[in-house]
Amino acid sequence: MIQELDTRIRERAHSIWEREGRPADRAEAHWSMARAEIAAEAAPATSPEASEAAAPKAEAPAKRARKPAAPRSKAAPKHA
């Protein structure tokens, strides 16, 4: 039973990782999100409002690093 749960969490975390663009530094966050989602699915639903209040809020996807801008060329100063 525990191995089955770990497998479900691992597969869900992998899906979250792929959905977020495969960031390299969010494994723990993805595992926590997957565990919370699966726990929420297993919990008996009392009402839609209670389910929404108990559900963990998804974190915004990590932003990708920008490529450094190309150096600007220095134009020769204009002489009057």
Image (spheres, rainbow, N blue to C red):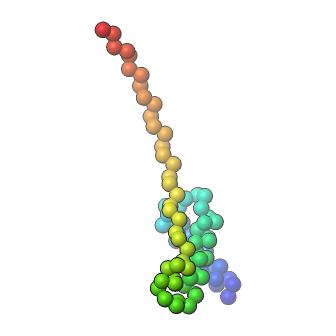
Q: Which residue occupies 64% across, 66% down? A: 28
- Is 13 located above or below residue 49 in the figure? above
Q: Nearer the viewer, residue 63 or 12?
A: 63
Q: Nearer the viewer, residue 64 or 57?
A: 57
Residue 11 visible to an observer of this rendering: no
- Is 78 located above or below residue 23 in the figure? above
The image quadrant of residue 79 is top left
- Percent from the top left, x then y, of residue 13? 57, 71
- Is 43 located above or below residue 71 in the figure? below
- Is 77 located above or below residue 27 in the figure? above
- Percent from the top left, x then y, of residue 1? 67, 88
- Percent from the top left, x then y, of residue 73? 41, 25
Q: Residue most toward the right?
A: 2
- Percent from the top left, x then y, of residue 6? 65, 79
Q: Which residue occupies 59% across, 77% down? A: 36
Q: Residue most toward the left?
A: 80
Q: Nearer the viewer, residue 64 or 39?
A: 39
